[in-house]
Image (tube, helix red, strand yellow):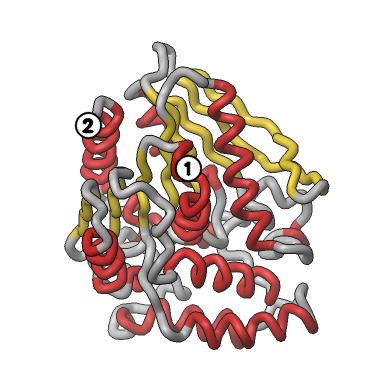
Amino acid sequence: MKETSNYLPSVVSDETHELYYTFYQPETTAKATILILHGMQEHSGRYADFAKYLAHQGFAVLTYDHLGHGKTAKTKEELGFFTLKAPEKRLIRDARNMAEFVEKSYPEVPHFIIGHSMGSFITRCLLRKQSSRFKGAVIIGTGGQNPAIGPAKGLLSLLSSVSPYNRSELIAELFGKLSNSHFKDEEFDYGTNWLSVNKENRKAFMLDELCGVPFSNNAFYTLFSVMETATARDWSKSISQDFPFIFISGADDPVGDFSKGVQSTVDNLKADGFKNVQLNLYDGMRHEILNEDIKEQVYADILEWLNKTVSE
């Protein structure tokens, strides 16, 4: 396997910024490519183990850091802040630009996309207009419609317009409480209980200086904008009903509303005539299913689906 990291210019609306990426390329001829989109307040390096696993199975895998995340953020001040101008559009267009980059590297093979958490919502937004580029999608740690998103977005829009760089302790605290409310009877683990059952993963998250950096008003507004678009009842109307999806979630993931949100998303797709939709729920597991103790099983389940889908 060959591993290469670099920066790639991403042009959005005639403005250019650089995205940090890592390309994991198999020793053998690639059977397909996979673009991985990470979640909020983390970075693509946390997917290295998963990417290497897939590369050893014959897939060329590209990971990258979103704006305001990981090594794409050149300074600590840039962490947790996206951009003032059309941030939702930029996140989605960045994903498209990275997809184009991997396609040019492997023009003769099928292409897949995997999105986790915030990355799952960006992925769903991208698929609304770009699904024809992909053979299928793996949606991990996602959620369904939430009536609170609209009002929250309205408030965050105001806060972002007035003080986009401000990092509100109140919003961060509220977000943490909502995420951890189901686990309030457990020993407090600095607000990371919701991430995983695996305590070593929580510890690694807390010790990683590129993880858990408080979001700015701009970033929270952008996140809720992406979520609102991605979870709209008609989000998939422009996607072919033959398009293959697999949804992966811990059954105790609060982002998926403890299975109800992701289940409703899958049910809606099937009700709308989608013929190739699979849901894997893992009992007792939480948000970061790729970092739980059962991750080898999850890896294998995703691989099985990829191998089946690439040959269809």
Residue 176 at x, y percent in the picture: 48, 79
Specify the label residue 223 is tagged with.
none
Kindly identify the amino acid type of the residue bearing the numbered disc 2.
Lys
Q: Quadrant of residue 310?
A: top left
Earlier residue among tags 1 and 2: 1
Q: Residue at x 46, y 18 (%)?
A: 108
* SS at mark 1 in the image: strand
**Quarter of the figure that contains the N terminus:** top left
Q: Quadrant of residue 211?
A: bottom right
Residue 14 at x, y percent in the picture: 82, 47
Kindly identify the amino acid type of the residue bearing the numbered disc 1.
Ile
- In the displayed image of the protein, which residue is found farthest to the top? 28
**Quarter of the figure that contains the C terminus:** top left
Which residue matches tag 1? 36
Residue 104 at x, y percent in the picture: 58, 24
Is 232 located above or below residue 89 in the figure? below
Could you classify mark 1 by the number of other residues whose Cα lies within 10 Å: few (under 14), some (14-19), or many (20 or more)?
many
Specify the label residue 308 is tagged with.
2
Is 233 located above or below residue 97 in the figure? below
Along the line of sight, the residue nearer the viewer: 230 or 261: 230
* SS at mark 2 in the image: helix
Give the Cα separation between the discs numbered 1 and 2: 19 Å
Residue 38 appears anywhere in the view = no
Left or right: 48 as drawn, with respect to 280: right
Q: Residue at x 25, y 45 (%)?
A: 298
Q: Residue at x 52, y 50 (%)?
A: 129
Residue 141 at x, y percent in the picture: 37, 60
Q: Quadrant of residue 238?
A: bottom left
